[in-house]
Image (spheres, rainbow, N blue to C red):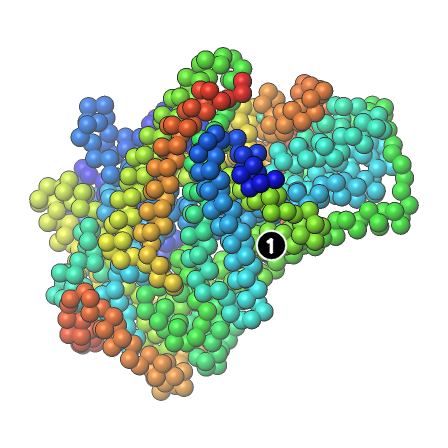
Amino acid sequence: MSFSAWVTAHYEEKGPVKWLAFALELVAAVTLFLLMVLTCADVFGRYFFDNSVDGATELTEIGIAILVFAEMPVITWRGGHVVVDILDRMLGSVLLKVLGLLSAFLMSSSLYFLGERIYFLAARSMRRDEVTEYLELPVGLIIQYIAVMSWVTAGAMITYGVYRLLFLSRD
Amino acid sequence: MTVALIGFAILLVLIVIVRIPIAFSMGIVGFFGFAYMQGLTFDNMGDFRWTGSLSMAAKRVVDTAQEYSLSVIPLFILMGNLVTKSGLSHELYRASNAFLGHRKGGLSMATVVACGGFSAICGSSLATSATMAKVAMPPMRKYGYADSLATASIAAGGTLGILIPPSVILVIYGLLTETSIRELFAAGFIPGFMGILLYLCAVRYVVWRKPEAGPCGEKLTWPERMEALNGVWGVLILFTIVMGGIYMGIFTPTEAAGIGAGGAFLIALSRKTLTFASLFDILTDTGRTSAMLFGVLIGALIFSNFINRAGLPSDLLAFVQGLDVSPMMVIFAILGIYIVLGMVFESLSMMLLTVPIFFPLVHSLGFDLVWFGIVVVVVTEISLITPPVGMNVFVLSAVLRDVKASTIFKGVTPFWCADIVRLILVTLIAPISLFLPELLYR
Amino acid sequence: ETVMRVASWLPPTHPQNAVVWPTWGKWVEEATEGRVKIKIEYGMGHPKTMFELVEDGVVDASFSYHGYVPGRFKLTQVVEQPGLGVSAEAASIAHWRVNEKYFTKANEHDGLVLAALFTHGPGQIHMAKPIDSLSDLKGKKIRIGGGVQGEIGKRLGVTAVGAPAPKVYEMMQQGVIDGVFIPMGEQKTLRLKEVARNVVALPGGMYLGSFSMFLSPDFMDSLSEKDRKAVMSVSGEKLSALAGRAWDAGDAEGYVAAKEAGVNLNEVAADGAMAKEFKSLAKGMDDAWVSHVTDRGVDAKAALTELRSIARSYGK
Ligand code: NA
Ligand code: NA
């Protein structure tokens, strides 16, 4: 199977969104795999070679943030967040779509405003030269990444997420 | 207290009726509730200084996404997914069946044990129910087991794993209440195995009342039994290394999760069940689940900031002290609330909603938070098989299209009773959960 | 009546929460004739987050350890340099005065109203297993809180493990770390006497740890001019001294608690082998710090000299 066919088979998304989903998930997958390798290397190094990986803690912290926020847009536009759906059968499909739209709007706008504040915090942290303790990596960069990904999530939800909700949901 | 209760009522409306994802509902109510506590009214919305509330929420996002101890979540889930994909469920079932299958109700008992073992590592009740349904249902049908007993043992067995460590739910509880994750894991051990034993009793009870529900299977010889064990050594060793390593202080839960995932990766590699595509699936599936869990966790932390600022925990304490009932009565009242909520909510949502509210009260009444964590997880496990909304039951009836949810719920009743017995025992006899942490760490 | 919400993060029994905040709260209440009261809130997040929570008005006041935010606070390490050899009280007063005179223009506490600067008592070595010389520490896993400790750790060749102080007990117990550099008081408040049963107390300790207490500018703006002045009148040097004194008292209690618990306490004499070893190891750290902070545009050398003379002559 060609690579492009594999991506098409693997992702329910349409058109370019499919490639965005793949790119984001590739980042997440690689990060998670490296997190696993890093933790193992750190433990093995510590117990067998008396030398742990320098800054493993910092790298782990950064790794989780990359992982979680790379997946955030995908799970959000796919409607993958935990929803309590006990009333679904009583509500009717039109009302459900309306409520879905309301959710999409609330999620996007809260992520947009949150992202704005997070971006501000990132800029402030960079202005003050805050770095990590051991590797002295700029703390602001990863905060900036979280802010940008919050915006990506908000943007993708209000566009593709809404499109998916209105035209692609199976029921 | 009124403000917090109104906030909680609004939250329930948003979650249940308006159907906003629970992470965002908690975040939004927490955000506006906190703003209200800082003086927001309808009149000053335009020129209100939102910085405080925004920064509170933003800092929770930024800090939680980079919390070192939370890396256990993706890593333990990764371990579970790797183990699931490497076909372990089959072999665990085969091994337990080799020892128990020939008894009356034996296939059911084997299912319970296999579910316990599998979900212990996998950690997800729903995944356990779905996988074991495919593995254990065909043989039970072949031997003429009643659908109600067969499905109920899978549905109930699937709930076991969220308590038997490693447990992601206990990690989240530990984070919300600042309790030692290692002690929680140790505390979950005995109640978890007690759950298996009581479920076995429930199976015995069913076949005692209705022998035709669970006829005997074939009896295997000892060499055959030993042979069946072969397939599960890898995973038994992995479990021993992970849990033993934590208990003996060789590594932290975080490191254990990394080692566990690495070990599961090697097991999967050695079984030649991994391709690049399936590895990619496992990694991304883990990533999606983790992102979802981080979402609800961040929401819960923002919500709990509001609950604390509104003074609910201290007001609740004052209220309870005014009632002049014994602390144990308070605990039973809380458990009653959980059982009722359990009809509607599944485990994670229920815990996230209630723990921030109850744990300060429980703590100030002088109870041990590790013990309370176990009690909470046991009661949330029950919610997974409590009608009308029992997630495990639903998953099962979705996987086995020809079995009605009502049949499963009927079959689950004895197991539900076994759970209630366990809940009462764990609540009244604290050492059941605290014995191991005391022995190991205190 | 205004309630000032103080976010705190050490255990409620810690001198900072049991003595410093309540005492200051009483001073504030008296100075404002009861118009401002304080209320302590726990569980607001990681200690390093307190700086920003206060700056943005999430809470009205808090305290934190400068070493938790590497890169932002460099000048505050002036008081942490090895070899000062004084009590926390003396060091805290010197810390405040020198900051007022030399460092305010560098504005490291940007966005905050500074209420006090103080230090904990002398940082000592707390280990699970005994050591006979400092070179035994090579390769050992030591929890480092940040600040000057990091440099000392590097010079000792330890494997540094970063974590906030409240996590130390669990990490010790788990064997994730072999030891920790921390003042004596934590033998009691963080219950280290149960897990770190071998203490090496160097004369004057290895280093001091710099803390600040700070107020939210928004909160201060919400007060009347009169109350603002009243709050500040019981802060500054007076509050710094109070905090230093309380942490000194905490150290004394920790010392007693460790003794009672039968902790193996090696009190190294001024001319003891380990004291000499440490002295040669720490040589030049102060100069390194001075050149490290040249980008701040202050006279660091003069500040360090003046801090030492104030601290060492205090109370004499
Ligand atoms: Na588990
Ligand atoms: Na339920």
Q: Residue most toward the left?
A: C225
Provide residue B330's location: percent of width, then percent of height: 50, 32
Residue B2 in the image: above or below residue A68:
above
Provide residue C75's location: percent of width, then percent of height: 22, 65
Provide residue B270's location: percent of width, then percent of height: 70, 53
Residue C101 appears anywhere in the view: yes
Q: Which residue is mark 1?
A: B262
Q: Secondary structure at mark 1?
A: helix
- Number of marks: 1
Q: Is residue A26 left or right of residue B224?
A: left
Residue C15 appears anywhere in the view: no
Residue C141 in the image: above or below residue B329:
below
Within 10 Å of disc 1 (Cα), the crowding (few <14, some 14-19, many 20+) is many
Nearer-the-camera pick, A37 or C51: A37
Q: Is residue A144 left or right of residue A55?
A: left
Q: State the residue at coordinates (43%, 21%).
A: A100
Q: State the residue at coordinates (54%, 54%).
A: A36
